[in-house]
């Protein structure tokens, strides 16, 4: 059977013009209007608190389910063809007509923040008179909501901020996505989508890698003014709102959103900074293997060693499913289902966004965007995104409000699945094949630790400066270079860095989000800790793993980690995870020195 390589939106609705889609669209809008109408009575003084909470939670969850399906369906079109004006228009209409939901949520949060603790506690006591199981099961969500309420502006100000977001941060974010997905780059006389150009960074031919790198930088130079305006707009809006909401800085709300505290972040960053000399040993060893004194940016992803296998998409799927099966039959069967039912959009093409992602759609279904080539790295990406989908599977028993997992924990299953694949690949490999796999592993680890650290430094600096004024394209680029040098040190060629990584990474442009960087490091290192637990006690770990995934939206990161005996506020925990990577660096360096 030939595998599907493009999404089929007709699996969800027949078309954008179909009666089925229109009915679902209008139904969501009607449900929202009804909830808006009933909200004042449900939150009025004297109303039955438990009954009101139960009703509001139930109806909000139902609306979120409908919204997820509609947004997901439209995303299938927009992310694979940003020139689809009909889908873009319908998404804009959906965002506008469902905008009152965000405003209603703000009013809900303000109301919860005003509740007497004793009254709320009584509603949470499901086994006592006046209690509710629905309310009790949302205890963590309500607790987070109460904390959030402490940082709300007035209702009028929050409503205005929500209404303006569509022409502010969200508009700038769309601009970045549309512009970068439509960019065509001339590489040696051939016009290629930017996604395909960036894939050339893994080409075996140094001349191809260097030409692609040079052409890419030239292309970003051509759009730097537009993208600088977008980044200034997004970060400026976020900084103003964070200040008006009483946050000490723009990091504080990011920590709250990620269910972690500053002590945990500082412990992790401290351990990462301590490990930088080891990662620089890797970069220098790679340069040595390539016959260079220092590594230029265009060689960061250069293949090292030799793979006997070209992982075309069918073979990549076969390999992933087989290795998943060694951990869990349930995981393997789920991955096979995702492949068979065409949940993946596989190859890069004009108008398609770069990178990869997984999104929940409906029930236990997800959809995954890839930009696959035949490298082992692409196999790891497939495993990573299927890990997200498996995480979503284990969240099906939870409501949408309980599924609001922080990105720190959202990366748990995905990175764990990468560990399964990379360790499986290493088991039987020798010689040049083993070096190739070590290189693939360390490329990924270096990105998630060293490059993410540079992005964290960059965003911290941008917020600090953006409070005072707009930054020019040159200032963004120079700041990016400073942060890269701070993270990579002397291991990279200072004359061949990437000043436009601020333009490349869509994470900086996500409206309403800040610091979409350090959670990746958290997720990767946390998963390495989990994988070590799995190797120590495989059967016990398997029995607890799915429950862990299903609970990631029900408590903060520290107590969740404590279930597995992990103290994530301790620098030593993060060091132990980094030591796993460093052992691979030791082997890699030894090979580079002829050992």
Image: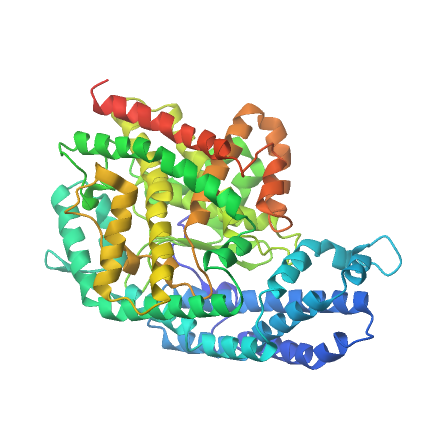
Relative to 585, residue 258 above or below: below
Residue ID at (54%, 39%): 569
Which quadrant holds residue 510?
bottom left
Q: Is residue 115 above or below residue 404?
A: below
Q: Residue furthest toward the top?
A: 595
Q: Is residue 514 above or below residue 263?
A: below
When the figure is inspected, residue 400 is found, relative to residue 22, above or below; the finding is: above
- Residue 30 coordinates in the image, percent (x, y): 63, 80
Question: Could you say which is closer to the camera, residue 249 or residue 402?
Answer: 249
Q: Residue 354 placed where, x, y %?
A: 33, 57
Left or right: 239 with respect to 284? right
Left or right side of 490 for 94: right
Front one among 520 and 429: 520
Colouring: rainbow
Taking the image as shown, residue 238 lies to the left or right of residue 504, namely right
Residue 94 in view in this figure: no
The image quarter containing residue 101 is: bottom right
Q: In which quarter of the image is residue 250?
A: bottom left
Residue 452 at least partly seen = yes
- Foreground residue, 534 or 125? 125
Horizontal and vertical percent position of residue 137? 73, 54
Give the residue furthest to the right.
129
How many numbered marks, from 0 up?
0
Instruction: Name the residue located 83 percent from the left edge and 75 percent from the top edge.
Output: 46
């Amino acid at each position: 059977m030939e595998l599907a390589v493009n999404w089929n939106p007709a699996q969800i609705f027949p078309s954008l013009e179909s009666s089925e889609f229109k009915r679902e669209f209008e139904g969501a809008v009607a449900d929202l209007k009804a909830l808006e109408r009933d909200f004042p009575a449900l939150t009025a003084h004297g109303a039955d608190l438990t009954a009101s909470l139960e009703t509001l939670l139930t109806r909000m969850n139902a609306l979120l389910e409908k919204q997820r399906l509609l947004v997901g369906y439209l995303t299938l079109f927009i992310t694979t063809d940003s020139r689809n004006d009909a889908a873009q228009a319908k998404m804009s209409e959906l965002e506008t007509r469902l905008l009152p939901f965000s405003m209603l949520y703000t009013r809900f949060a303000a109301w919860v923040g005003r509740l007497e603790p004793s009254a709320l506690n009584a509603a949470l006591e499901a086994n006592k008179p006046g209690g509710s199981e629905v309310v009790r099961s949302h205890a963590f969500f309500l607790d987070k909501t109460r904390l959030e309420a402490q940082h709300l502006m007035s209702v009028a100000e929050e409503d205005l901020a929500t209404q303006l977001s569509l022409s502010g941060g969200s508009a700038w974010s769309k601009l970045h996505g549309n512009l970068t997905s439509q960019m065509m780059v001339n590489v040696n006389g051939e016009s290629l989508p930017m996604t395909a150009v960036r894939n050339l960074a893994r080409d075996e031919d140094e001349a191809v890698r260097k030409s692609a790198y040079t052409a890419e930088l030239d292309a970003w130079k051509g759009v730097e003014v537009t993208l600088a305006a977008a980044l200034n707009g997004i970060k400026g809006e976020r900084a103003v709102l964070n200040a008006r909401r009483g946050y000490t800085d723009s990091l504080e709300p990011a920590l709250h959103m990620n269910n972690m505290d500053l002590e945990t972040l500082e412990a992790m960053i401290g351990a990462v900074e301590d490990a930088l000399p080891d990662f620089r040993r890797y970069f220098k060893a790679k340069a040595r293997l390539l016959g260079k004194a220092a590594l230029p940016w265009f060689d960061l992803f250069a293949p090292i060693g030799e793979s006997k296998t070209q992982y075309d998409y069918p073979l990549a799927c076969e390999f992933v499913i087989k290795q998943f099966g060694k951990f869990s039959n349930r995981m393997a069967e789920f991955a096979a289902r995702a492949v068979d039912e065409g949940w993946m959009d596989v190859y890069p093409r004009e108008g398609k966004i770069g990178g990869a992602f997984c999104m929940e759609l409906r029930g236990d279904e997800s959809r995954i965007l890839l930009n696959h080539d035949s490298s082992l790295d692409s196999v790891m990406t497939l495993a990573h995104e299927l890990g997200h989908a498996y995480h979503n599977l284990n969240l099906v028993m939870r409501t949408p409000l309980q599924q609001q997992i922080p990105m720190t924990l959202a990366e748990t299953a995905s990175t764990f699945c990468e560990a399964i694949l990379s360790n499986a690949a290493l088991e039987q490999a020798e010689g040049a094949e083993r070096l190739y796999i070590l290189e693939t592993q360390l490329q990924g680890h270096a990105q998630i630790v060293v490059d993410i650290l540079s992005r964290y430094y960059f965003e911290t600096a941008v917020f600090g400066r953006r409070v005072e004024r707009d930054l020019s394209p040159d200032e963004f680029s120079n700041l990016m270079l400073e942060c890269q040098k701070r993270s990579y040190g002397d291991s990279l060629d200072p004359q061949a860095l990437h000043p436009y990584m601020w333009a490349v990474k869509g994470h900086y442009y996500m409206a309403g989000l800040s610091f979409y960087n350090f959670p990746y490091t958290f997720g990767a290192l946390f998963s390495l800790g989990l994988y070590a637990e799995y190797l120590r006690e495989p059967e016990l770990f398997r029995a607890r793993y799915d429950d862990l995934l299903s609970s990631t939206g029900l408590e903060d990161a520290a107590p969740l980690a404590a279930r597995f005996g992990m103290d994530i506020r301790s620098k030593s925990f993060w060091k132990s995870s980094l030591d796993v990577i460093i052992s691979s660096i030791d082997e890699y360096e030894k090979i580079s020195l002829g050992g």
